[in-house]
Amino acid sequence: MNDSIRIQALKFGDRRHYEWETTLLEATDAHLFVLGHYGRKLRHYTKGKTFTVENWTIEFFPFDRWFTVSADVADGKIVQYYCNISQPPRLNGDCVSFVDLDLDLVYRNGRWSVVDEDEFAENAVKFGYPPELIERARRELEGLQQRIERKQFPFDGAIERFIRHIPG
């Protein structure tokens, strides 16, 4: 595996949603940590646009969990978390893909909140989410909230150890 890792967010049914390039920080059999560079291009297929991302991120993709984590870093500290509830990410060569299930848990301005519940409800109908998938996504969101509250991996300082890889 080389150091460049492409990240692909998909919608249910493996529909392309958006993608971007990152740099590998750590790979194990259970997860990847990658670095999203300031100024990277995010190709958004759903919106038909390409965006320039003007922040550094440390991103976490566990292969056995139903979430992803993106931590925005500024001035040497994490200033925001964006967690997608998703089907477990998959690694194929130098590409990590995950099926985004719309529900997101976000940390901004000192507090955690659930966002995109309306999008989850709309896409459940639009893409025909099976009832067990809807139930699983909600259960996984609760599990992620508990993981954060209990400061369990990767919310135990594991993400912060990669901040040193971001140019000062």
Image (cartoon, rainbow, N blue to C red):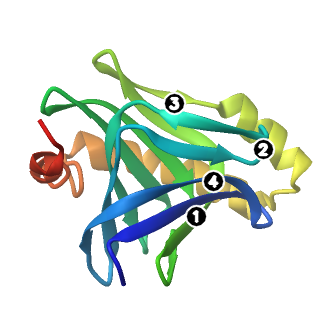
Q: Residue at x 36, y 32 (%)?
A: 55
Looking at the picture, which amino acid does disc 2 mark? Thr
Tell me the kind of residue under disc 4. Asp
Question: Where residue 145 sits: x, y (%)?
Answer: 38, 42
- Tell me, yes or no, if residue 156 can be seen here: no
Residue 28 image position (x, y, % from top left) = 27, 80
User: Mark on residue 46?
Assistant: 2
Quarter that holds the N terminus: bottom left
Q: Which residue is mark 3?
A: 114
Q: Nearer the viewer, residue 136 or 35?
A: 35
Query: Contact, CB < 8 Å: mark 1 with mark 2?
Result: no
Callouts 4 and 3 close, C-beta under 8 Å? no
The secondary element bearing badge 1 is classed as strand
Question: In the rendered view, does 100 fall on the left or right side of 119?
Answer: left
Q: Is residue 158 above or below residue 31?
A: above
Structural distance between the alpha carbons of marks 2 and 4 = 13 Å
- Kindly report which numbered mark, 2 or 4, lies closer to the viewer in this rendering: 2
- Give me the C-alpha separation between circle 4 and circle 3: 15 Å
Residue 63 appears in view: yes
Labels 4 and 1 touching (C-beta < 8 A):
yes
